[in-house]
Amino acid sequence: MRALVTGANGFLGTWLTRRLLAGGHAVRALVRPGSPPDALSGLDVERVRGDVTDPGSLPSAVRGCDLVFHLAGVRRAPRREDFLRVNAEGTRILLEACAAHAPSLSRFVLAGSLAAAGPSATPRREEEPFAPREWYGESKMEAERLTLSWAGRIPVAVGRPPRIMGPGDRENLMFFRIARAGFLLAFGGAPRPLSWIDVEDCARGMELLATRPEALGESFFLASPERTSVEGLQREIARALGVRTRRIPVPEGLLRGLGSAADVVSRVLGRHLPLNRKLAEQVLAPGWVCDPSKASRLLGFEATVGLAASVDRSARWYVEKGWIAAPATPPAAATK
């Protein structure tokens, strides 16, 4: 089958593209003009220039496709309207293009997010109402609502991953750099439990959503049964890097203030900084936990990569690519 992947040169998009190619699918990658194509180098994919916010660029992208995986979106932005324009409005424009120009489409799969369901220290389930806490989650909620509203016209499915880990990830890179510098950030209060998934497992789950009839018209949390916490993740990173860290208390008010200030700087500079209001709100939430049992029960999906293995792979990749400095000692020292 021919599959279109929007955001194919992103973190999850690259892994999904490789998986689809390995499964014998022909892959068409929608790549925004000006975006670096490096992640797709050496892959036998058809590259199509376009943008989900540009209706004129989409008919040729979706035409002749059997599957559409919609992964394109923004995770960092200084304004609410930026998130909604790309993540929500872009989804609507792509759905309309599929309805008009992809008559053989057998599945439209949206990469949603746990952020749409909202934070919780107890496991979220798919049937619970949306309760996003920040702009990114709000935009992903609207994208999912739009997608499911088309279920009578287009065969749709939604995957909601939590935090995604693995080689190539930029969202968690800041924690690796902080740990490499010898620090562990402590945000106080009760433990903040986190669900997560390795990118390889996530790509496999997204492929299942495109092929299993049980996924039609449904949303699924795609997550590992293993959980961690904000501090637990940092300790695992320190272990993988072989560094000892010093615990640094970070007051909630300070983090929120820095996140808001960073958004102002982002608007002025036109750059999306690693620290932002979204990250501050996500870190300070009581937890981000979801229940993956629906995907297990209906799709037979089970995440198999453990946290230690996922963090180890990420750490090695960051060092090999020069994104963080190599540890001075072999990975053996424990976090204080």
Image (cartoon, helix red, strand yellow):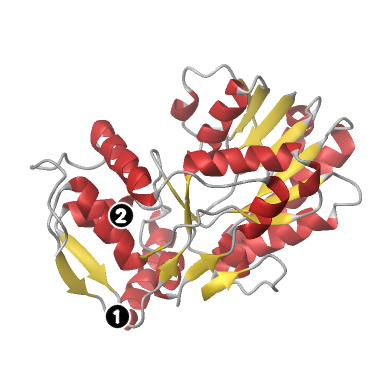
Q: Which residue is mark 2?
A: 174
Q: Position of residue 290 (x, y in %)?
A: 56, 65
Q: Residue sitting at 76 percent across and 51 percent down?
A: 92
Q: Is residue 110 above or below residue 8?
A: below
Which of the two discs, 1 and 2, sits closer to the camera?
Answer: 1
In which image quadrant can residue 231 be found? bottom left
Measured Cα–Cα span from mark 1 to mark 2: 19 Å
Q: Is residue 117 above or below residue 74?
A: below
N-term mark: 1 or 2: 2
Residues packed near mark 1 inside 10 Å, few (<14), some (14 to 19) or many (20 plus): few
Q: Position of residue 155 (x, y in %)?
A: 84, 44
Three-letter code for the amino acid on which mark 2 is drawn: Met
Q: Against 256, is 330 above or below? A: above
Say which element carries label 2. helix
Within-10-Å neighbours for mark 2: few <14, some 14–19, many 20+ = few
Residue occupying image coordinates x 49% and y 58%:
77
Task: Inspect this view and state whether residue 51 appears.
Answer: no
Is 54 in front, or is 12?
A: 12
Residue 271 visible to an observer of this rendering: yes
Instruction: Say left or right for 260 vs 62.
Output: left
Q: Residue at x 58, y 35 (%)?
A: 32
Image coordinates of residue 1 in percent, x first then y, are 75, 23
On residue 188, which mark appears? Answer: 1
Q: Nearer the viewer, residue 204 or 254?
A: 204
Residue 308, percent from left and from top: 33, 48
Disc 1 secondary structure class: loop
Is the Cβ of the residue at disc 1 closer than 8 Å to that at disc 2?
A: no
Q: Amino acid at mark 1?
A: Gly
